[in-house]
Image (tube, helix red, strand yellow):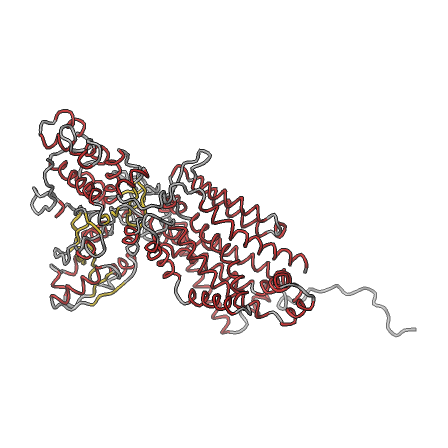
Amino acid sequence: MSDIAAPAALPASRQPPVRMTGPLAWLRENLFSSWWSTAVTLALAYLLIRYALGFVDWAFVNAIWSVPTGANGLPDTSSCRNNPGGACWAVITEKHRFILFGTYPFDEHWRPMLVCALFVGLYIVSAMRRFWNWRIVPIWLVTLSLIGVLMWGGVFGLTYVPQERWGGLPITLILATFGLAFAFPLAILVALGRRSKLPAIKAICVLYVELIRGVPLISLLFMASVMFPLFLPEGMNIDKLLRAQIAIILFAGAYLAEVVRGGLQALPKGQYEAADALGLSYWKKTLLIVLPQALRLVIPPLVNTFIGFFKDTSLVLIIGIFDLLTAGKTAIIEPQWQGFGVEVYVVLGIIYFIFCFAMSKYSAGLEAEFNRHRRR
Amino acid sequence: MQPILRHLTAATAVALGLATALPAAAQAPAPAQAPAAAAPANTLDAIRARGTLICGVNTGLAGFALPDSQGVWRGFDVDYCRAVAIALFNDANRVRFVPTTAQVRFTALQSGEVDMLSRNTTWTFSRDTSLGFDFTGINFYDGQGFMVKRSLGVQNARQLDGATICVQPGTTTEQNLADWARGNRINIRPVVIERLEDNIAAYNAGRCDAYTTDVSGLAAIRAVQSNPNDHVILPDVISKEPLGPLVRHGDQRFADLLRWIHFGLLTAEEFGITSQNVQQALANDPRPEVQRLLGRTGDLGRMLGVDNAWMANIIRGLGNYAEIFDRNLTPIGLQRGRNALWTQPGGLQYSPPFR
């Protein structure tokens, strides 16, 4: 017989104390744990709300979305000028097509628009693991040829558009995409070359990386656009965009090479030895054992460099190419739109942010997936 | 592990494949690029063979060269390019505009990337001689000046002793300011700010007492201030900035064409020929010089190697000098000033006779 009598009924289960779990507890623990924390929270909340409200007022409540056409046929921006407390989004309404597509013929804007869509589609397809096989090669070749045909025209009844009329977002995407697509394989070769045992190859790769890294991108662009044409025979011209593109590829290649080399260095020696022990040739060893592991290690710095270069393409403004940023800057030179730079820069910032943030999120996902086996 | 390997190798292979395949693809659809490897001895012939003029312009300067909201180039310098296209092809659209920055403009012309520059470029000794260019005339007389707030009470530039002056770096503007201050024993404190917008913001915030750049630029800035009358452009002009189109040394016939287009525009203004009445003048203006200008009598066009109706076409399409000026520069607040015809007081624009 047991002393312990079974209770007649289980006691009603009680909620944990509200002060220990739940949102209130979280607030208490993280924001109001001490008088000092409370003070900081209150001060920051005050500032945040105040400036957020100020921004909402500026960007939405007091904003002017369009302006009438004045007597001289030009937009009359006086209503914007008399409204210092609000944004003048009319500048975007008026200029958005110029900012996005630059001096591309107005009636043909559907072509660069389609090109941007193709680029985004290409990025999405390339990001899908399903397409990481031979199929990606024709996809890239077809898409890029299509982009070339759309931009240049001259065939299939499309009017020919010379390169100097291209502008805006397509230029930025072209420079960034081609730049990184060419620089990345170049970088891998150079990184391998720097670790090569053949002295000539090693010297060339070291020289390339150190020379290119030793000068700023601006000076390379200047060299490509100012000095290089003087070396060519008279009457021969290489497209200005192509020259800038090559400068960007060379520059990005040197930086990416060092990133890739970091990955190669980080790989334990045992991996190389194991591959040698299996009797793999140099290229098999590199392609099957070394690079897959090394590249996986350097995803964060690679993406860091990619994002950096996406934005660095805006430096082509100094050689007179109308990329997205230059087109935005040019849009606010017209006297009636001078002084509305903030609105234009906010929009440009959002566009750049979308692309860079997408890259960053995608790489974070990739990194997590590739390094799953390392997580403990 | 295995799939990842395959994927990464595939990705690398793609990239490597692209590296070899793409330059060909990128080059293929560029028919009009680099038409002939052989250097055409004569730019004019090259332009004719190509069927388009390639004109170097500013990347964006209000009133002189700026793409509008639809991406169409407009401005004073742009109209000069269009005038050449009309003279050669009777089509204002057979011209490609290559935007050039201050740093690359001369190389672009030297290397043949552009046929001519119409890019508010100052005619100086060294540019005309050692850089190997030929300036074809002065279509705009500019000069560096100062803008101050009216409340400062400054009447002329010599009273700026001890003032802080905002200036953009890189151009001759900064050098002119230093030279002028030293020459006049005036003590100024320059504040060098890269971007125009930041300069204006600094000036408006009272960071500088004055802002200096070419008078044409000052007028454009003053015109968009919330109250233009609060700002004065001082009468002193501390430098000469004669602007005009230029071509390479050795392109004499092309230079002749540019030079006489400018003179033709001036002569048209002098004789009162406008885009409105050119048709009428062509038919029944009794003045011999007008008849020669418009190509009704004489062979002036053919002497230049263009159609005899060249000036009539240009005036019909773009107007005379006054109309080009009014359309582009008056809206940004510029007065004719020294760019008035020589028949006006203070005017310097003077054309040799058409005969």
Where's the N terminus of chain A, which quadrant?
bottom right
Q: Position of residue A2 (x, y in %)?
A: 90, 73
Q: Residue sitting at 16 percent across and 64 percent down?
A: B179
Q: Is residue B227 visible?
A: no
Who is closer to the viewer here, B162 or B353? Answer: B353
Q: Residue sitting at 10 percent across and 32 percent down?
A: B289
Q: Residue sitting at 51 percent across and 68 percent down?
A: A202
Who is closer to the viewer here, B337 or B160? Answer: B337
Q: Position of residue B183 (x, y in %)?
A: 12, 66
Q: Is residue B314 left or right of residue A139?
A: left
Q: Position of residue A316 (x, y in %)?
A: 38, 55
- Outermost residue, top side: B284
Q: Is residue B197 left or right of residue A167?
A: left
Q: Is residue A244 visible?
A: yes
Where's the C terminus of chain A, which quadrant?
bottom right
Report the number of numbered marks: 0
Q: Quadrant of residue B210?
A: bottom left
- Outermost residue, right side: A1
Who is closer to the viewer here, B245 or A306? Answer: B245
Q: Position of residue A191 (x, y in %)?
A: 53, 65
Who is closer to the viewer here, B321 or B300? Answer: B300
